[in-house]
Amino acid sequence: MILPDTGANQADRLIVVGGVAAGMSAAARAKRTDPDIEVVVFEKTAHVSYGACGFPFLIAGTVKDPLDLVAIDAETFRRDRGIDVRTDHEVVELDPVSKIVTAQNRHSGESVTLNYSKLVLSTGGSPRTLGLQGIDRPNVFSLRSLEDAISLKGYIDRTSPKRAVIVGAGYIGLEMAEAFAAHGIAVTIVQRSHRLLGAIDDEISEVVAHELDRNGVHVVYGAQLSRLVGDGTDGPVSAVVCDDVAGPIPTDLVLVAVGVGADSKLAQQAGIRLGATGAIAVNWKQETNVPDIYAAGDCAEVINVVTGKPVHIPLGTTANKQGRIAGENAAGGYGTFKGVVGTAIVKVFDLEMARTGLSLSQTEAAGRPAKAVSITAGSRSKYFPGYSDITVRLVFEPTRGTLLGGQIVGGDGAGMRIDTLAATLHAGMTVEDLSRLDLAYAPPFAPVWDPLLIAAGAALKEL
């Protein structure tokens, strides 16, 4: 069934495809920029504007209600902000010549076709799959939407699994290891490479690996998942088989967390240019190569400030910022987004790990000259309760000493120090500049010489 157009003039309608971080930021910003513009949001799931980074804490039980992860629900957007949010509607066709989108209700199958004047693609990311038979068995999960998180939490509550296999040791994989452990589940992580977290260097990765081991999480390195073993063709998985690993690994639950690629299928079908990363290519205004179409969030590329090159970094912070710029420009305003330095932070049991910019391995892979230093120092005054070690690693140019990246790992209070390094990267500062910063000191928070200053001093000695 084709439902009729709502009657609004195509000349003043913005359609947003996807209603999570980037999409709802774009919709809200557009409405603030031009209150008279009609904004229609199509979201294929039942929820909008939720915090996907909270999924592990929902599953662990730290967050009690799934709806606590929803910042603003669809009805509030409709009632208070005048945004026409249509949940459970997936856009299945985009015609950029006629400026028409067709969306389908995933429950009724009914279709609606609307014209647009401007369009924002915020289709998000798509979990990478392994292409294995049995990936759709009832105890095999991915974790991308709020519905995914609710389904996984419900399965744990119903079946009380004793063992879980996590495929992939990225941020989600590590956080979910702790979430499963909170339920008394024995966790095995199957990791294709020979270390954790490819965006950090070995010595930081080793600290994280030790923390996993200390908490009973078993990591199998250099293992490529090759087969899921279960009863019949559609029964639950009872074991996983990996290349180069002796014997099957028994399990009651499988979580596939091998990363997220850009969901750019709709864009590609519409002739919108993709970048080398496979995500949608955009300029600083979030414009695509097709007039009047913008893209933002996990489906789009972003400029890495350190390298000046487009990259794909699917993080909620980036999605929200890009969405605001896309919405402002789509509504007739003017905004630019100059890029990111790839700052990220993760909690692994009692450990905090954060990184920003480039690792030494990344600079070497790019053929860029760089040096790195690592130091370990105290998180606060040694006599103050809660003192723990922090390891700081700085990556910098070997001539001028311009900072290229940094990594931090340690106990309580370690991780958020990464924001100082992120600001340093955005400012194009050197390690000498960093060493001169007037950082706060008080015994509960930091020693007289903060670990960042000690690391900067060590880097200066290498120049």
Image (tube, helix red, strand yellow):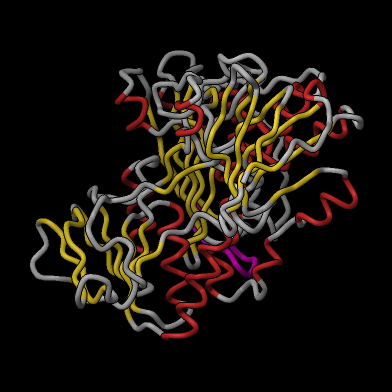
The residue under the point 71% across, 66% down is 68
Residue 138 or residue 345, whichever sits in front: 138
Which segment is the magenta one?
A: 382-390
Judge left or right: residue 176 versus residue 37: left
Q: At x 64% / y 24%, what residue is drawn?
A: 294
Residue beneath the point at 35% across and 55% down: 169
Question: x, y (%) of residue 306?
Answer: 51, 22
Examine the structure image and report whether residue 224 is included in the region drawn in magenta. no
Residue 424's x, y, as percent? 61, 28
The residue nearer to you, when weighing 71 against 131, is 131
Give the side of residue 187 with respect to residue 266, left or right. Answer: left
Instruction: Check the image and report above or below for 87 versus 298.
Output: below
Asked whether residue 386 is drawn in magenta, I would say yes
Tell me, yes or no, if residue 307 can be seen here: no
Give the side of residue 26 with respect to residue 288, left or right: right
Residue 173 location (% of width, % of height): 40, 58
Query: Can residue 52 be spotted in the picture?
Result: yes
Question: Total of numbered circles in the picture?
Answer: 0
Residue 73 lies in quadrant: bottom right
Q: Residue at x 40, y 51 (%)?
A: 170
Q: Quadrant of the C terminus?
A: top left
Which residue in the rendered view is the most extreme toward the front?
1
The percent position of residue 403, horizontal first and vertical second, equals: 51, 25
- Taking 360 as reference, is 235 above or below it? below
**Majority secondary structure of the magenta segment?**
loop
- Using the image as rendered, state which of residue 238 and residue 102 is in the foreground: 102
